[in-house]
Amino acid sequence: MNNEILYILLPDYAAHEAVYLSQAIASDEFALKENPKYVNKVVAPTMDAVKSIGGFHTVPDYSFETMPDDYAALVLIGGFGWSTPVADKVVSIVGRAIDKGKIVGAICNAASFMAKHGFLNTVKHTGNGLEQLKLWGGDSYTNFDGYVHAQAVSDGNIVTANGSATLEFAKELLILFENDTLERIEMYYQFNKQGFCSLFSIE
């Protein structure tokens, strides 16, 4: 199996939502990993640089047309692009990933996109609130009882999260990826959640 984790970035993407996950994939607390289990790759609509909400420009590794058929996981990073027509081009990409049993993560508005296209109808899930999922999902979203009011939810190979849950999103995906031991993943989560000063107080 290809070891690339593909991050889907649409124009006006939320850069912070990829940080904890991508960092844990590529490095540990000491340095960049010499032989990481996975490799981060960016997929965008075209090979042109894609701009984040904060104004950063990211040069993609692949476009929708050139992305590989085989990869380890697909991660949909939130932002304002998911409510625009360009998001329609991602529907078939996600559909193929789910059909192949790939791990799929979706955070913030990307989770609402998943609801809009019926991808959450068979799994427990979360997002930016049930009302937003209903609003975006319309008649295509029917799994109201599957909604869990939590920061992030993992069910099968699908992980969803709300826009404030970047760290929880990363934790759930890292567990699915078996990126490290459960103890080390928990340590990474707690260190970033509580902060250095809370974990290592001065007597």
Image: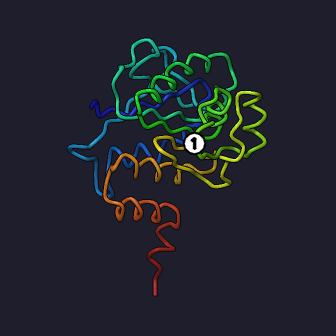
At x 52%, y 62%, the residue is 193
Horizontal arrangement in the rendering, residue 14 relative to residue 130 (left or right): left
The extreme bottom residue here reads 203
- Image quarter hosting the N terminus: top left
Q: How many marks?
A: 1
Which is nearer the eye, 147 or 41? Answer: 147
Q: Position of residue 47 (x, y in %)?
A: 45, 15
Which is nearer the eye, 186 or 58? Answer: 186
Which is nearer the eye, 147 or 90? Answer: 147
At x 61%, y 54%, the residue is 151
195 in relation to 166, above or below: below
At x 43%, y 28%, the residue is 42
Q: Position of residue 15 (x, y in %)?
A: 54, 37
- For the residue labelled by badge 1, is the local secondary structure a helix, a strand or a loop? loop
Which is nearer the eye, 34 or 138? Answer: 138
Q: How is the image coloured?
A: rainbow
Horizontal arrangement in the rendering, residue 81 relative to residue 174 (left or right): right
Q: Which residue is mark 1?
A: 123
Q: Amino acid at mark 1?
A: Val
Horizontal arrangement in the rendering, residue 16 relative to residue 144 (left or right): left
| Quadrant position of residue 182 | bottom left
| Quadrant position of residue 3 | top left
The extreme top residue here reads 65
At x 34%, y 29%, the residue is 71
The extreme left residue here reads 34
Q: Position of residue 181 (x, y in %)?
A: 31, 59
Q: How crowded is the residue under tag 1: few (<14 C-alpha within 10 Å), some, or many (20+)? A: some
